[in-house]
Image: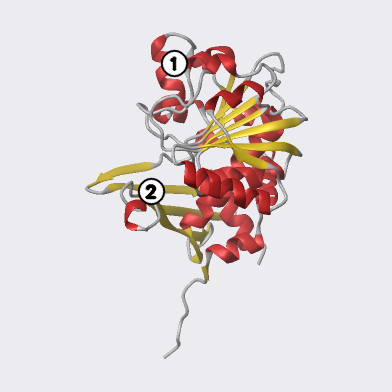
Amino acid sequence: MTETTGPPWITGAEIFRRVGFRAAARAIDEALAGGLDPARDFDRGILDLDHGQLLLMPAQAARFAGVKVATVAPGNPALGRERIQGVYLLLDAATLGPVAILDGAALTTLRTPAVSAAAANHLAPAGIDRMVVFGSGPQAWGHIEAMRGIREIGQVTIVARNLGRAEDLAAQVRESGQAAGVGTAAHVGDAQLIVCATTARTPLFDGTLVPDDSCTVAVGSHEPDARELPSALIARAQVVVEDAAVALREGGDVIIPIEEGVVAAGSLVPFRSIVTGRIPVDRGRPRVFTSSGMSWEDLVVATAVFQAR
């Protein structure tokens, strides 16, 4: 009898050893510049469970296909467990045979900041004196590392509900050689780069304070009735989204302001149009990139990880 072995398991540590934030951001940018169209992505399945949500995220490309099965369990941190868990199954596109299984939580921790950094590389000012980060979890840390890959940053200011966790993250950032401290939402008033990576369901700051020459990234919400960004900022900003249809279905950051009448759905700019130069970046007002996560992003980064072996 011939023994068969299954696809290799790629741990979280191995994912980050193979592909860092800068390389993952470059892979996202190159995929969009090379013709990938997010509008052709499969819809993400979101199933409500008794203790959270089950997310199914399939995607396909020329050489590989894949699916991420992830769970979001809001009660897990209180039990000492991760809020987001999951696995990613990478397949050969021609045969649909499995070629690798990746740690899904680590993949998400890598790809979400990578997408944000790819967008901010187009939208953010060249000089970043202050970066304000809302949140203190893995995504907050990942976004700091990813943004440091595209810009030199003078000061990182952490804003979080849990002051102890904010202090811990600031200390971790300082240990890496980056100036960092804890602040308040008012610090957005002199920030050139703002990142929102929280579980908040209502706006985190006063949108009138945000400077015109700035970039704000929001990644915490994938529900139509939850948002991190205030309508006052959306009304002023050039708003860039992964895909307009997805944003209008899942993105409370834009759905709620549209319902309020402060912005038109037709004004949303697909990220692909920025990357390809079809729509120019408007440097005369704030730029916002709001993301709820799409399946093609996981496939792009999972492919980069697999090919880097």
Q: Is residue 42 above or below residue 276?
A: below
**Which residue is at the front of the view, 280 or 159?**
159
Residue that appears at 32% across and 57% down: 79
**Numbered circle sitting on residue 206:** none
Q: Quadrant of residue 221?
A: top left
In the figure, is residue 279 to the left or right of 223? right
Say if residue 218 shows up in the picture: yes
Residues packed near mark 2 inside 10 Å, few (<14), some (14 to 19) or many (20 plus): some
Q: Residue at x 60, y 45 (%)?
A: 170
Residue 103 in picture, x, y percent from top left: 48, 61
- 71 relative position to 218: left or right: left
| Label 1 sits on residue | 257
**Residue 286, image x and y in percent?**
64, 19
Eyeballing the image, is 34 above or below 271? Answer: below
The answer to the question of whether label 2 and label 1 lie on touching residues, with beta carbons closer than 8 A, is no
Quadrant in which the N terminus is drawn: bottom left
Left or right of residue 63, residue 81 in this image: left
User: What residue does disc 2 label?
Assistant: 56
For label 1, the crowd category at 10 Å Cα-Cα, with few meaning under 14, some 14 to 19 and many 20 or more, is many
Q: Determine the residue located farthest toward the top in the rendered image.
A: 261
Marks 2, 1: nearer the viewer? 1
Looking at the rendered structure, the secondary structure element under dot 1 is: helix
